[in-house]
Amino acid sequence: MIVPLLAIDKRGHRVGYGKGYYDKLLSQCKPTCMKVGVTLFEPIEEIEDVNEMDVPLDYCLTPASYIKF
């Protein structure tokens, strides 16, 4: 599944557009579903307000890199 995002940290946690749509959808996916984020920015060190409903991504694509978490 390809997921747009605003920011991602080095553990694969994302900040999206604020409605929780993708977290709800990702939580219903099979464990084998590959979750790939797409962003214009490189990962930040840590997103501090991660909660139990947030689903981390497996990979992220940026203009400069391909990251596996």
Image (spheres, rainbow, N blue to C red):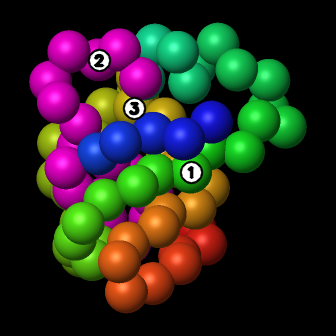
Q: Is residue 19 above or below residue 55?
A: above
Quarter of the image holding residue 33?
top right
Q: Residue furthest bottom?
A: 64
In the drawing, does residue 53 fall left or right of residue 29?
Answer: left
Which dot, 1 or 2, sits closer to the camera? 1
Helix, strand or loop at label 2? It is loop
Q: CA distance from mark 1 to mark 3?
A: 14 Å
Helix, strand or loop at label 3? It is loop
Query: Magenta includes 41?
Result: no
Query: Magenta includes 14?
Result: yes
Q: Amino acid at mark 1?
A: Val
Is the residue under label 3 in contact with that under label 1 (CB below 8 Å)? Answer: no
- The residue tagged 3 is 54
Q: Amino acid at mark 3?
A: Asp
Q: Which residues are magenta?
A: 6-22
Q: Is residue 8 above or below residue 19?
A: below
- The residue tagged 2 is 20
Residue 63 coordinates in the image, percent (x, y): 35, 77
Q: Is residue 45 above or below residue 11?
A: below
In the drawing, does residue 6 fall left or right of residue 12?
Answer: left
Where's the C terminus, which quadrant? bottom right
Query: Tag 2: Cα neighbours inside 10 Å, few (<14), some, or many (≥20)?
Result: few
Which dot, 2 or 3, sits closer to the camera? 2
- The residue tagged 1 is 36
Measuring 19% from the left and 49% from the top, which residue is drawn there? 6
Residue 37 coordinates in the image, percent (x, y): 46, 51
Q: Earlier in the sequence, mark 2 or mark 3?
A: 2
Q: Main secondary structure of the magenta part?
A: loop
Q: CA distance from mark 1 to mark 2?
A: 16 Å
Measuring 45% from the left and 39% from the top, which residue is drawn there? 3
Measuring 58% from the left and 61% from the top, which residue is drawn there? 59
